[in-house]
Amino acid sequence: MKLVIFGATGSIGSQVVEQALEQGHTVTAFTRNPDKLNIQHPRLNIFTGDVMNQTLVEQAVIGHDVAICVLGSGKKLTGNVRSQGTKNIIQALEKVGVRRFICQSTLGTGDSWGNLNFYWKYIMFGFILRKVFADHQIQEQYVRQSNLDWTIIRPGAFIEGKRTGQYRHGFPSSDHSSSLTISRPDVAEFILKQLTDNTYLGKAASLSY
């Protein structure tokens, strides 16, 4: 498949790019800083641009089968890069006719709030990462309101680790048995599984060990 990946140089994005190439996909990596992507491959194309620039986003998505959004906020804990960037991607996809959209959010958004423990509810998302969490909530609203064939991925907190393929997904909001953590390579693996599995089409999938 032909994939365009937004947030391609981030900690999740770089894993998605690498694993997608391993699987034989053709990848367009959309990034503001191409020098940060230390991957070279004949099926890898670099598109330099800012996701806040609607015109560039439209140019980037033309001719692709699937768009994957793994936007991060970098070192900033404020701003609306995820939500506004996602909105721009959605509008571009709808305009050019690319229907499949996979968007990474975070565990705790929407009905997955019930999965979180006290620490994540009231210290991290309730205080320290309050604005980041709010941005994710708005991001998901844009995805749900779109006319695309979307899937939302809600991973737990990222930890260092290898790709294991052993993780839990799609658990209900009443579940309190997950670790609320997952490695970046496993997040990327699960994102790419959505390319050939429609289980979570039009749904949000929680993801954790």
Image (tube, grey):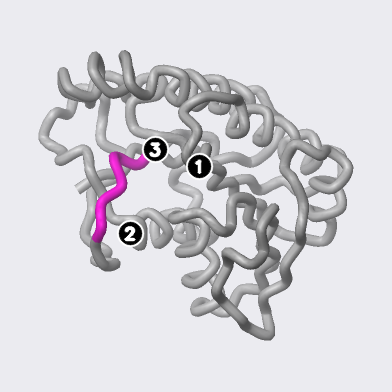
Q: Is residue 121 above or below residue 3?
A: above
Which element type, helix, strand or loop, lies under badge 2? helix
What residue is shown with label 3? 154
Residue density around tag 1, few if under 14, some if 14–19, many if 20 or more, within 10 Å: few
Q: Nearer the viewer, residue 197 or 117?
A: 117
Distance CA(mark 2)–CA(mark 1): 20 Å
Q: Is residue 4 above or below residue 145?
A: below
At x 21% / y 38%, what residue is drawn? Answer: 180
Magenta span: predominant SS is strand
What residue is shown with label 1? 74
Residue density around tag 2, few if under 14, some if 14–19, many if 20 or more, within 10 Å: many
Whether 56 is among the magenta residues is: no
Residue 204 at x, y = what percent?
44, 34
Q: Nearer the viewer, residue 35 or 80?
A: 35
Q: Is residue 53 visible?
A: yes
At x 27% / y 64%, what residue is drawn? Answer: 165
Please tell me in which quadrant of the rendered image residue 17 appears.
bottom right
**Residue found at the far left of this picture:** 177
Nearer to us of marks 3 and 1 is: 1
What residue is shown with label 2? 186
Please tell me in which quadrant of the rendered image residue 12 appears.
bottom left
Q: Amino acid at mark 3?
A: Arg
Q: Is residue 205 above or below residue 121?
A: below
Q: Amino acid at mark 1?
A: Gly
Residue stretch in magenta: 154-160
